[in-house]
Image: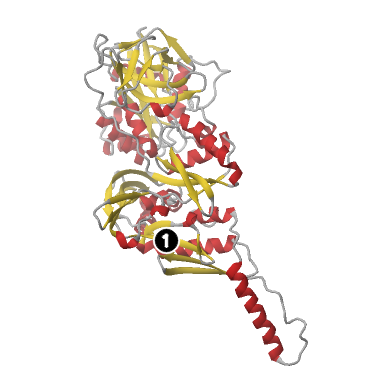
Amino acid sequence: MSQIRNFSIIAHIDHGKSTLADRLIQHAGLVTEREFRDQILDTMDLERERGITIKSQTITLPYTDKKGETFSFNLIDTPGHVDFSYEVSRALASCEGVLLLVDASQGVQAQTLANLYMAMEHDLEVIPVINKIDLPSADIERAREQIETELGLDGEAAILCSAKEGAGIEDVLEAIVEHIPPPAGQTDAPLSALIFDANYDPFRGTVVSCRVFNGSLQPGDLIRFMSNGAVYKVEEVGVFRIQREQRPSLSAGEVGYIISGIKTVSDTSMGDTITLDTDPAPAPLPGFREVKSVVFSSIYPIASDDYQDLADALEKYKLNDAALTYQKDTSSALGQGFRCGFLGLLHLEIVQQRLEREYGQTFIMTVPSVQYRFTLQNGDTVTVDNPQYYPDPVLITGSAEPYIRANILIPERYMGAVMNLCMERRGMNSQFTYPTPGRIEISLEMPLAEVIVDFYDKLKTVTQGYGSLDYDLIDYRESDLVKLDILVNGERVDALSLIVHKDRAREWGVKACDRLKKEIPRHQFKIAIQGAIGGKIISRSTVAAFRKDVTAKCYGGDITRKRKLLEKQKKGKKRMKMVGSVMIPQKAFVAVLKSDDE
């Protein structure tokens, strides 16, 4: 065990985490030049395009130090986005130390701090590494200063490297041997292993990634998951190289995989403890919690014939992504579909893009919403994530919505624009800290519903891309919530209904009516598009009717003849409006969902 080192790389988005992992893998000689490609641990096209890690990966690297001793390094890669913070915390719980990456040109940013605090919570050894020293804009001294003042680490001891050029990689590997402690644990104690990831193999079932803390495990053992009591027989164990590599056993301190005929990824839970059924561990490892969806949206097939295809695609997708939850849903405007729950807005985007690319689906998504709580007159509390199930307003005595604590890190010059944006989104209790000259960290509380639609995009726009955001859910707070309905020609369109704060209802109503007016084609009669709260109309747009010039044949004469013809036309239009139904094109629904006019 003294020859094992378990570590992770943590950083803000785009500070070079995947590139550094590439260099470490190349240095260990796991891939030949011909087989190598950038971001080798990112297996999805989507990850490679967007330059983010979505699914965490693990790899075991052999290393021989300067004294000739051989070590086994387990690099547990983590997703970089705030939506996957629970997965990151489980991966960190499997390590003894981390490499904290700081971009030499950007300095310390919001998620650098958030990830450092998470590493400190797990009591991990932190090695600061200043990356991208080859850039012309690199300011190494400023980065050292920020590591000292903002992170409270020794800036002078920070290792300099350029993951792109391969400079300083040997220093990083030596620092891992010296500073990160070997794992502690007993091979003769009852088995306890932490699940930090799982992925689906179509031929073998679920492949569980785990870190063994105590005991050992080999094929043929009966294992039990402590959260749900499920028992499985181990078929194969091994470690991750570029491909899976089978081993006779896994013992305390090691990181590897277990295959035991588990049907779906949903049968395993992140953070669960694996133990032997015959000789169980006395207690599960700490920190386990059920992953809960935060953002909800409904998806409907564009053509009703495609419903079964969409259902099959979701079922297959769910095999790979246990965090997605879905159930059947129906809408009078859009037909049958599914109500889905996501970890956050990035997770929603990823699911949407993967369903479109990997499964060839085309569908409509409704406006994302969060879970609201309503207290009724009889004392019951109901949780509503879909505006269709908004309770009768007469019965509601109180309503509450989830709040977050947002940490926004920006250059000082954008302070005014960012504060305006936060105030618009009902931000409150703001606190300011000045980590270094010229940079401000704003910490404030705001409703989650205001963040999930387009807040991050707007923040990036007003700060010209320099703003970074990190947030944590805090609690539910009392809020004046109403249901905004959109009426088209007097008919309620349920797919466009929203639960909004009363103060912002008119703004949302005006926006939705104006966008629909652009998208709904003209009919033979006038179409009124209205935003309503209960029976009260708060916004309106009108789509003008097609009109035939019925007075064209009157070439003079008495005005009453013209008036008679126009009155006759007016009656016809009125009758048509009573019986005519409005065709709402699919793109109209999409237009309402867009965060801004494009």
Instruction: Point out the image quarter for the C terminus.
Output: bottom right
Q: Is residue 47 visible?
A: no
Query: Foreground: 424 or 356?
Result: 356
Where residue 357 sits, quadrant-wise, is top right
Instruction: Name the residue located 46 percent from the left edge and 12 percent from the top edge.
Output: 245
Give the x, y percent position of residue 2: 29, 11
Instruction: Point out the image quarter for the N terminus.
Output: top left
- Look at label 1 and name its amino acid: Leu
Query: Foreground: 505 or 574?
Result: 574
Q: Which residue is label 1 attached to?
A: 484
Q: Residues within 10 Å of mark 1 (few under 14, many from 20)?
A: many
Give the x, y percent position of residue 143: 35, 36
Q: Is residue 567 visible?
A: yes
In the rendered image of this protein, does residue 123 appear above or below residue 301? above
In the rendered image of this protein, does residue 65 appear above or below residue 228? above
Instruction: Name the residue located 44 percent from the left edge and 18 percent from the top edge.
Output: 261
Where residue 347 sits, quadrant-wise, is top left
Instruction: Name the residue located 40 percent from the left edge and 65 percent from the top edge.
Output: 534
In the rendered image of this protein, does residue 593 appear above or below residue 127? below
Mark 1, secondary structure of its residue: strand
Give the x, y percent position of residue 412: 35, 51
Give the x, y percent position of residue 266: 41, 29
Left or right? Give the position of 121 relative to 70. Answer: left
